[in-house]
Image (tube, helix red, strand yellow):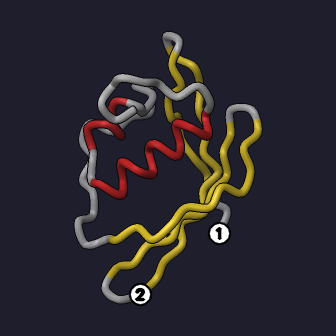
Amino acid sequence: MHLGRHTATTPEQLMRSRYSAFVVGDADYLLQTWDPATRPGELRLDSEREWLGLRVIRADGDEVEYAARSLVGGRTHELHEISRFRRLLGRWVYVDGDFPD
């Protein structure tokens, strides 16, 4: 998907591909798959962060709840997000998310 040969057919697929983009530092892909209405003008990724794993908690309709673990400065962190997606011109895009923790 990162090379543009395939597109996500579900919000969960898009979320997983976006997680992979965070892992490899592909900010361009993250911006391309972000809804233009909510997309930031620029995205700087933390080069010190090492992503350790992803756990999908729930995928329901246009929402995906997940937890992603990372390591920064020797400390483990967990990001818990309920992400929202929508179809735009036939493709799924990331809209925004809530952070329940």
Left or right: 18 in relation to 2: right
Mark carried by residue 101: 1
In the image, farthest residue toward the bottom: 74
Looking at the picture, does residue 38 appear above or below residue 77? above
Q: How many marks?
A: 2
Query: How crowded is the residue under tag 2: few (<14 C-alpha within 10 Å), some, or many (20+)?
Result: few
Residue 12 screen position, x and y as percent: 61, 40
| Image quarter (top left, top right, bottom left or bottom right) of the C terminus | bottom right
Query: How crowded is the residue under tag 1: few (<14 C-alpha within 10 Å), some, or many (20+)?
Result: few
> Residue 59's image quarter?
top right
Q: Which amino acid type is shown beneath numbered disc 2?
A: Arg
Residue drawn at x 35%, y 89% as measured from the top left? 74
Looking at the picture, does residue 64 appear above or below residue 72? above
Secondary structure state at the residue bearing disc 2: strand
> Residue 70's image quarter?
bottom left
Left or right: 87 in relation to 51: right
**Mark nearer the N terminus (2 vs 1):** 2
Mark 2, residue position = 75
Mark carried by residue 80: none
Left or right: 9 in relation to 52: right
Q: Which amino acid type is shown beneath numbered disc 1?
A: Asp
Residue drawn at x 41%, y 31% as measured from the top left? 33
Residue 41 screen position, x and y as percent: 26, 36
| Image quarter (top left, top right, bottom left or bottom right) of the N terminus | top left
Residue 14 screen position, x and y as percent: 52, 36
Distance (Cα) linking label 2 and label 1 = 18 Å
Residue drawn at x 27%, y 57% as measured from the top left? 45
Secondary structure state at the residue bearing disc 1: loop
In the depicted view, which residue is nearer to us: 78 or 21? 21
Looking at the picture, does residue 19 appear above or below residue 91? below
In the depicted view, which residue is nearer to us: 7 or 96? 7
Residue drawn at x 44%, y 33% as measured from the top left? 38
